[in-house]
Image (cartoon, helix red, strand yellow):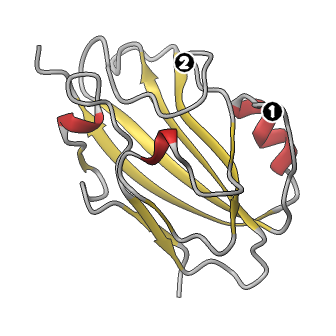
Amino acid sequence: MSFTILSSAFGDSAAIPAKYTCEGGDTSPPLAWKGAPATTKSYALIVDDPDAPDPKAPKMTYVHWVLYDIPASVSAIEEGKSSSVPPGTREGTNDWKRTGWGGPCPPIGRHRYFFKLYALDTVLGDLRKPSKSALMAAMEGHIVAQAQLMGTYQKTK
C-alpha cells in the first residue's frame, strides 16, 4: 500500500471550500492518511503555497501550517483541530509568525496549497517552534515516506 494523504473536504487538485479560508471560519480542514512504512516513529505536516503573492509571478512560498512529532499511532487530524492538535504533536511557526493553521487568503488569482505529510523514522523532540526550513533541516535523513495533497483557492471578494 502506498503512503497517501487525503481530505474528506476536497479532492486532490480540487478547490478548498471557503470555510477553511480567510473568507470563511479559517478552520483547518480534516486530513487522514494511510500506508505509512512500519518504521514510522512520527509524522510531520507542512502546508504551503508556492504561488505567493501572484500565481503569474510567484516570489515566495508562503507557509500556512507546520506540525511535527505527530505520533505514529495517529492517522488523522479532525476538522478545526489547528487549536487542539493530537496529543504529543508539536507546532512550528507559519509565515504569520505564529503557530496553528492559517487558511488560504490569496491576494490575487487561484493559488495552490500543498499539504505535505512526512513519515519519519524518529521523534524529533522540542525544536522550539521551528520554521519550515528549520524543520526540514531537522528531518534530513529521517524521512522514510512522503505523501502530498494539493488543493486550490481563489478569493471571491
User: How many numbered marks, from 0 up?
Assistant: 2
Where is residue 56 shown, x and y percent of the image? 33, 18
Q: Is residue 71 above or below residue 115?
A: below
Please tell me the numbered disc located at residue 5: none
Amino acid type of the residue tagged 2 in the rendering: Met
Where is residue 45 shown, x and y percent of the image? 60, 50
Q: Residues within 10 Å of mark 1 (few under 14, many from 20)?
A: some
Q: Nearer the viewer, residue 130 or 149?
A: 130
Q: Nearer the viewer, residue 12 or 40?
A: 40
Residue drawn at 56 percent across, 49 percent down: 85
Displayed quadrant of residue 52: top left
- How far apart are the two marked residues, 2 and 1, measured between alpha carbons? 17 Å
Q: Which residue is mark 2?
A: 60
Where is residue 23 shown, x and y percent of the image? 21, 23
Tell me: 117 left or right of 128. left
Amino acid type of the residue tagged 1 in the rendering: Ala
* Badge 2 vs badge 1, beta-carbon distance below 8 Å: no
Tell me: 42 left or right of 77. right
Q: What secondary structure is marked by label 2?
A: strand
Where is residue 11 shown, x and y percent of the image? 26, 59
Q: What secondary structure is marked by label 1?
A: helix
Residue drawn at 53 percent across, 88 percent down: 1
Q: Is residue 114 above or below residue 111?
A: below
Residue drawn at 73 percent across, 85 percent down: 38
Q: Which residue is mark 1?
A: 134
Tell me: 65 left or right of 127. left
Q: Is residue 72 above or below residue 31?
A: below
Name the image quarter holding the C terminus.
Answer: top left
Foreground: disc 2 or disc 1: 1
Displayed quadrant of residue 121: bottom right
Q: Earlier in the sequence, mark 2 or mark 1?
A: 2
Q: Residues within 10 Å of mark 2 (few under 14, many from 20)?
A: few
